[in-house]
């Protein structure tokens, strides 16, 4: 097996991947306003497999507090409706033919606090992912120094760059969380 090589760009790319996942998860947190992204995490049992809702229907926002889900295949309406109910997003589908309407209820104070807690969990998961990437990078550097592939000075310098990338990613995570928290708590 070839020795692991150190690639700072790969480390930064993996950290950005954790940030993208966090952005997607946070976009699914309800803020009291309708957003087509709210339904992104929902999987529908379709044609013997699990598919994202946006692959069986078109989601639109006709009003600020209403989502409209236009199911393409009539036979998929019940499965789509079930997936929405099972998603624990607190939405009650009203179905008319192939269109499922979802009223977005007002958020009460308890529900807002609950959503903030969920946001914090998502952010912590992203921080852990970034720290794992950092650890992987540091391990490769240690091994390369031990195997005399890089000098101690290079190790220290690259260590600093990995830490800088980590600090940057953690800072972005904190900013995303703060913005989402403000959005959720603002009435």
Image (cartoon, rainbow, N blue to C red):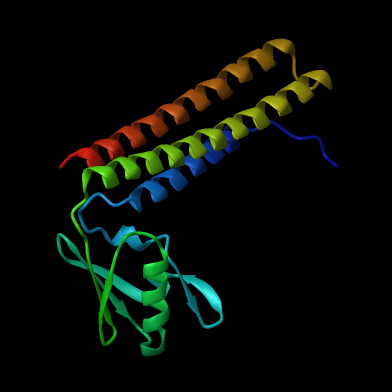
x and y percentages locating residue 6 in the rendered image: 68, 30
Q: Residue at x 41, y 27 (%)?
A: 171
Give the vertical position of 3 relative to 46 (above or below): above
Image quadrant containing the C terminus? top left
Q: Residue at x 35, y 59 (%)?
A: 89
Image quadrant containing the N terminus? top right
Q: Residue at x 40, y 50 (%)?
A: 24
x and y percentages locating residue 136 in the rendered image: 67, 32
x and y percentages locating residue 57 in the rendered image: 35, 76
Kindly indicate the quadrant of the structure image that contains residue 151: top right
Task: State the residue lying farthest toward the front.
Answer: 110
Q: Residue at x 59, y 38 (%)?
A: 10
Q: How many marks?
A: 0
Is 5 on the left-hand or right-hand side of 41? right
Task: State the residue lying farthest toward the top.
Answer: 153
Kindly indicate the quadrant of the structure image that contains residue 158: top right
x and y percentages locating residue 44 in the rendered image: 45, 73
139 or 149: nearer the eye?
Answer: 139
Give the vertical position of 150 relative to 134 (above or below): above
20 or 149: nearer the eye?
Answer: 20
100 or 85: nearer the eye?
Answer: 85
Kindly indicate the quadrant of the structure image that contains residue 82: bottom left
């Amino acid at each position: 097996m070839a020795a692991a090589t150190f690639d700072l760009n790969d480390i930064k790319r993996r950290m950005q991947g954790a940030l993208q996942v966090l952005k997607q998860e946070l976009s699914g947190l309800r803020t009291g306003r309708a957003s087509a992204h709210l339904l992104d995490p929902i999987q529908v049992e379709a044609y013997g497999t699990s598919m994202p809702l946006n692959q069986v229907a078109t989601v639109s926002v006709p009003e600020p507090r209403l989502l409209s889900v236009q199911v393409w295949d009539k036979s998929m309406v019940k499965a789509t409706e079930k997936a929405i109910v099972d998603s624990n997003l607190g939405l009650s589908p009203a179905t008319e033919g192939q269109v499922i309407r979802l009223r977005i209820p007002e958020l009460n104070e308890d529900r807002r606090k609950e959503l903030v807690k969920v946001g914090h969990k998502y952010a912590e998961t992203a921080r852990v992912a970034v720290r794992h990437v950092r650890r992987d990078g540091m391990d490769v550097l240690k091994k390369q120094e031990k195997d005399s592939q890089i000098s101690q000075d290079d190790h220290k310098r690259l260590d600093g760059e990995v830490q800088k990338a980590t600090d940057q990613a953690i800072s972005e995570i904190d900013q995303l969380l703060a913005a989402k928290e403000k959005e959720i708590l603002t009435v």
